[in-house]
Amino acid sequence: MRFLKISVFLSLILFSVSNQLAANSWIRVNQAGYLPADIKVAVFISLNEKSTPVFEVRDALTDKIVFQGAGKKSDAISWGMKSAYRFDFSKIEKEGGYYIVSNGAKSPNFRIAADSYEGLSDFLLEYMRQQRCGDNPYTGELCHQDDGYIVGHPSRNGEKIDVRGGWHDATDYLQYTTTSATTLYHLMFSWEQQKDKSVFKDNFDARGRKGANGTPDILDEIRWGLDWLDRMNPEDKVMFNQIADDRDHAGFRLPNKDKVDYGWGPGTGRPVYFVSGQPQSLGKHFNRTTGVASTAGKFASSFALASEILKESDPEYAAKLRDKAVKAFAFAEEFPGNTQTACVVSPYFYEEDTWVDDVELAAATFYKFTGDANWRKRADYWGQLEPVTPWMELGRGRHYQFYPFINLGHYYLASSSDKATKDKYIQYMKDGLEHLRKRAADDPFIYGIPFLWCSNNLVSAAITQARLYREVSGDETYLEMEMALRDWLFGTNPWGTSMLVGFPKGGDYPDSPHSSYTVHNGDLTYGGLVDGPIERLLFLERAGKSLTKPDMYAPFNNGKAVYHDDIGDYASNEPTMDGTAGLSFYFAKMESDGKEQAKAISEKSALTLKDSQGAVVRVNPDKKVIYLAFTADSMFQGGGKILKTLASNKIKGSFFLTGNFLRIPEQKGTIEKIVSQGHYVGGHSDKHLLYAPWDKREKSLVSGDSLRNDIINNLVELQKFGVSQKDAVWFMPPYEWYNKESVYTASTLGLKTINYTPGTATPADYTYPGMSSYKTSDELIAKLFAFEKSNNLNGAIILIHPGVDDRRADKLYDRLDSIIKRLKKLGYSFDRL
């Protein structure tokens, strides 16, 4: 009774707030979703002082309250707000779709699901392929085929050298060894650290074109970057640090249309900067280079890790890279100091001052894979000179001053079998995280990271270090901060937007990134992590006049940092390759965590295969079980025969019914029979709308709200026949046609999108003579069993339409009994979803 009184009291407080409060209040959530066992926190911010801490979590399908609580008050002033709370709902572990209400405000729908991060590490590679130089799979065109001409060398200036390939740094087409080598190392580290390699798929070939080649896509991307890095170090002590310079900043253009003239004619070759160990410039603005170790160390660490990854698949290349790694390391120790990037037009460059971390990482990489104590001692010598990455300790830094943003060498040493070394570097890692935690203080987002240019790269570094520290130490002190910073990237931030372009599809993410592809092709830099929020004064100094439209985020840009989803804003809204690649490790780990949690929740949900849009197309593909599926909208002539066939074969099927069908009075008896006989019954949309164009699947024909209403109305009709919304978790979209956005929207309602298994052919049973796509039942059955022979039907969803056009006399459902018996002879059994 006491609990009931408290619940009623909290509800009265919650719903007594005015509409004015709601209009100036926002609830920010992680749009990607939460794993069931995650720490789960939403953040409430408001321009109203009298906001209350009370909140409710509601089921997105039923609107029923599943959790009530009171938030923790946090600092609102620093974000230009008047009240802020952290809403912790970690006690909810049940998979499903939810939303939060408080003070009249309502959060976006979000999901709790074990597959929330499935495929996300590979999604980052979409941006990496888009950034390829030399042969660009996005444009399908060659670019920068004349790279390049040596500059900054004491005797070889003007000499032609082949350094084609690699990745463009960002929207500009410069190429830097410092960021490219770091990007490469991040991708290799992700692969090397991930025990479950199945998270990395093979959907593209070595040139980045669609089509599997027997090699996981991440390894293809690693090889692309590695071959370029190899060319940038053609011989011992001959290294190059940069291709092109800031003369590249000549407006938006596609890479194959780059006609900047660097002195050899428009578009006919770019300068390739030699690593001299001395300050450089081809103009009046010199950098502050003091040595070669920062660049040589990056060559050494990348070649060392690559030699380990390739030792079995390409032993000759691996041996070559190992030799180059040893020589590069010796060069780094011989000439300590930093090599910065060069500029010509303006005094802006990558101001990398640190270098001992690069030398440490190289030695630590050798130690990791050899176990040689001499390498451990070399790594420790350099590592203890920089115990904490400076930006973490100082809370400040110039552009790329303290780079790389994470010292992975510390992690390798913290994993050492030598206890003294292990303890020392675990403490170093902890010290860095502790600086961030202290600066976060009372921040509602637990955000203690400085708002430098490319602040999201620092977030990536922080969550990676937190994860690695947790793994190597077993200490979860910083887990809540880690989760908060991860959530920041997906919408738990003042602006409520994801910082990853194109994800989640159907959510709020940058749709105007600073990109030539967006300007010229109207396309997005899918998979790219944008720079992120930047300190206000720094934005005004660097990009204050860059905005091209009114600021949609104006109410949230009155605090300590600003962010703009504006194509002109190159300070906060430009994707970068190193920041993007830096998330590969963390996202792969999150996907693995989800798989493990799925196994703990239910064996049945642990194994599914999905298509490119995210819909399940096989269930338990390791078992010889087939799922027969049937859909209905306006026609159901064969329904009775199908039910008799299923009954005579003692099989349960899965029926997906539209609201239109459920409202037909004449079908009431048949529907009741389907339900009473124990078949699965799920939604097929309410009005049988087409969600996406046939020719441009990535576009959506219905809004998110319309789609949600269509699904919910369908489920309301199902309830009238005793099918609860929680029993109808599998959803088959109308026309069996959908896109990533509709799959995501369904998931935020707690539904799992399913479709027939591609290649099974039977869904073409709706065709009739006169249609160009017409197939007889004999043809469809032949195709089905040919597919079974070459691909098997383990876990397959076989779709047959109970209602087809009268012009088709040859009904496939008339052959269902013989199909079932033939499949049984092949050893298959049948089940419902």
Image (cartoon, grey):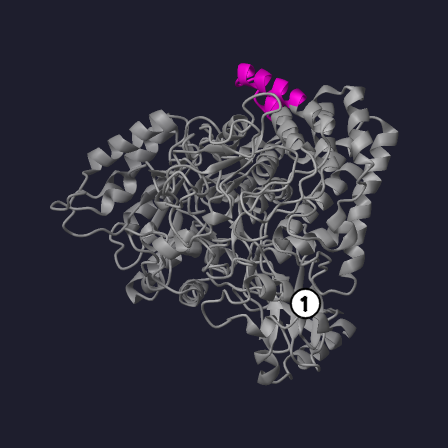
Relative depth, front residue between 424 and 262 = 262
The magenta stretch spans residue 322: yes
Q: Read off the magenta span.
A: 306-327
Relative depth, front residue between 55 and 263 = 263
Residue 144 in picture, x, y percent from top left: 40, 37
Q: Which residue corresponds to mark 1?
A: 560
User: Within the image, what quadrant is residue 421 found in?
Assistant: top right
Q: Which amino acid does label 1 sit on?
A: Lys
Residue 321 in picture, x, y percent from top left: 59, 21
Which residue is found at the position 47% from the left and 62% from the top? 568
Residue 542 in picture, x, y percent from top left: 58, 61
Q: In this view, does 389 lie to the left or right of 228?
A: right
Eyeballing the image, is 614 above or below 710?
above
Please tell me whether mark 1 sits on a helix, a strand or a loop. Answer: loop
User: Within the image, what quadrant is residue 266 found in?
Assistant: top left
Q: Residue furthest right?
A: 420
Which residue is found at the position 20% from the left and 34% from the top? 778
Query: Magenta: predominant secondary structure element?
Result: helix
**The N terminus: image quadrant:** bottom right
